[in-house]
Amino acid sequence: MARYVTRVATPLAADAAFAYLADLTNFEHWDPGVRRSVQVAGDGPGADAAYDVTVAATPRDLTLRYEVTRYDPPRVCLVVARNAVLTSTDRITVVPDGDGSIVTYDADLALNGPLALFDPVLRLAFGRIGDRAAAGLRRALDGEAVPT
């Protein structure tokens, strides 16, 4: 399994930061690896929401269906995507910090079945992908990195 965790201190209040990140249609605005994100279930962010997220992949782009499995505003949103090849689990946690908030984005990516043998290679690639996404997240939230 590959894991990437980033923490961002943002001047946004917890409810505003949470609302932005829990709406996965915003993925494409801050994660350069995401080509497109479309809501396919629910009406805005919420426990019944699902999103088709198209990510840049080799040899062709890959669309994953992310379903919200936990929605506890303005603190926690958990989304999971599974297909025959991989499972992606993203946890968004927001805590108040003075007038702003601290956002933690914790992403796990695991290859399924026999492909799990290639997890060490996936970890290397996921680190680079995560670094680019973390930089985009800091820009989108007008924030600064906080040690994890």
Image (cartoon, rainbow, N blue to C red):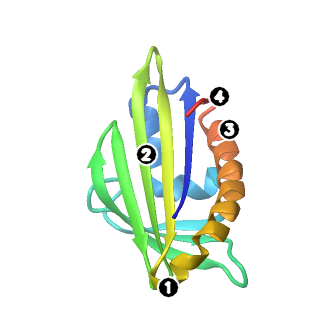
Secondary structure beneath disc 2?
Answer: strand
Q: CA distance from mark 3 to mark 1?
A: 38 Å
Q: Amino acid at mark 3?
A: Arg
Residue assigned mark 3 = 139
Seen from the viewer's position, the closer of residues 44 and 105 is 105
In the image: residue 96, left or right of residue 60: left
Secondary structure beneath disc 3?
Answer: helix
Q: Are marks 4 and 1 in contact (CB under 8 Å)?
A: no
Secondary structure beneath disc 4?
Answer: strand
Quarter of the figure with residue 142: top right
Q: Residue furthest top?
A: 98
Which label belongs to residue 144? 4
Q: Nearer the viewer, mark 2 or mark 1?
A: 1
Q: CA distance from mark 2 to mark 1?
A: 29 Å
In the image: residue 76, left or right of residue 134: left
Seen from the viewer's position, the closer of residues 138 and 20 is 138
Q: Are marks 4 and 3 in contact (CB under 8 Å)?
A: no
Q: Amino acid at mark 2?
A: Ile
Residue 110 appears at what percent x and percent y?
50, 69
Residue 55 appears at what percent x and percent y?
62, 70
Which label belongs to residue 3? none
Residue assigned mark 1 = 114
Q: CA distance from mark 2 to mark 3?
A: 17 Å
Q: Nearer the viewer, mark 2 or mark 3?
A: 2
Label located before the other in sequence (2 or 3):
2
Label located before the other in sequence (2 or 4):
2
Residue assigned mark 2 = 92
